[in-house]
Amino acid sequence: MKQLLREHAEQAFAQELAALAKADDRPRPPNWKLSPQAVVTYLLGGKLKDGTVITPKYIGSRRLIETAVATLATDRALLLLGVPGTAKSWVSEHLAAAICGDSTLLVQGTAGTLEETLRYSWNYARLLAEGPSEKALVPSPILRAMQTGKIARVEELTRIGAEVQDTLITILSEKTLPIPELNTEVQAVKGFNLIATANDRDRGVNELSSALRRRFNTVVLPLPTTLEEEVEIVRQRSEALGKALELPAEPAPIQEIRRIVTIFRELRSGLTLDGKTKLKTPSGTLSTAEAIAVVTNGQALAAHFGNRKLQAPEVAAGLYGAIVRDPVQDSVIWQEYLETVVKNRKDWNDLYKASTELLKQSK
């Protein structure tokens, strides 16, 4: 049996989904595997009456997740909006897994995405041999979702050209996709809906038309509100990734995770946590996802080139890679932060030494 690097949500959490379905006695919308309340429990975590523990997939506002789930139970599509690293894709995948048991009906939006990617294309060998027919038709993930009453997903919607985006208007308003070549149409089966994600920093790239935006209910996923909330997110995700990658390293010490998250939050906001020192912000986003990557990369370094325990030298290497994107501007910002903040913090001397040494080596 092949060992998958990353299982889909419905595979990785199959036991939790099965336990929720068994215990779920609330009304379910047509073709939903779980009730809306059970979907929220799956996303936010909880404990069932039989003792089954549901691990939290998202740490944040319950109301945001309730709003997202309620939207998908209506005829409006869901747009998850936020800055990079706010778990938009993660939430989208888990919502689809919990609602229809299939998170794979996915379109990745890019500048090169064509209308055919959202609608349908053709098997051209068959098309030339037989002419237009249902057998020659190659349905898109969205068309397959319409036919089966499932959730379709579109990643990075605002990266797609505006004229291609508008292909979705008829699908979302009429719940119908015309196929003029066959003189027919596909009408969506109950349960069909669409989740799109968009990067807040892409505003102005390919703004949604007012007609398309009206078809979506927008839920903005914010960065974690508190330091402890972000620390817990990074701890959980890095621990799960470490297990999936089978890294022969100890779990990341919570104090190292807290230092990484503290640095990210301060440089993101341009202000130290105590509000006393203003800071310059680097060019990178320094998102929660990048903090998770710093921890995971540090664990890999520690596992294969260290003593299997995440320590200051591994943390420094990850921080440098995440913060110094512009070798000129960001290096100066990072060095200033080290001298004005890290150097003066109690018990941070090891990180200061490792980071300054790395900066010297990079010049």
Image: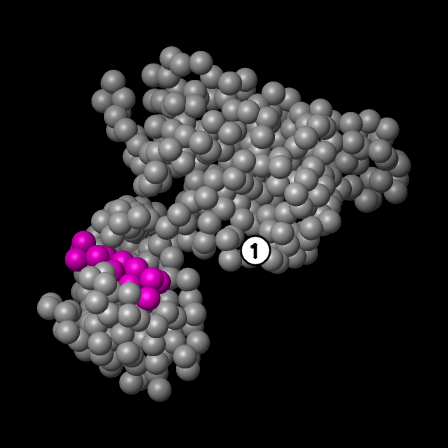
Give the residue at the far left of this rendering. 346
187 w.r.t. 106: above or below: above
Query: Can residue 300 be seen at all in this image of the molecule?
Result: no
| Image x and y of residue 57, in percent | 35, 38
Which SS does the magenta portion mostly show?
A: helix
Q: Is residue 59 magenta?
A: no
117 w.r.t. 28: above or below: below
Q: Residue at x 33, y 62 (%)?
A: 269
Q: Quadrant of residue 318?
A: bottom left
Q: Quadrant of the N terminus?
A: top left
Q: Quadrant of the C terminus?
A: bottom left
Label 1 Cα neighbours within 10 Å, binned few <14 / some 14-19 / many ≥20: few
Amino acid type, callout 1: Arg
Where does the magenta region start and end?
A: 253-270
Q: Is residue 258 magenta?
A: yes
Q: Residue at x 62, y 37 (%)?
A: 214
| Residue 198 or residue 23, whichever sits in front | 198
**Disc 1: which residue:** 203
Q: Quadrant of residue 195?
A: top right
60 w.r.t. 303: above or below: above
Q: Is residue 86 left or right of residue 81?
A: left
| Image x and y of residue 159, in percent | 61, 54
Q: Which colouring convention does the figure follow?
A: one colour
Q: Is residue 198 left or right of residue 256?
A: right
| Image x and y of residue 221, in percent | 42, 45
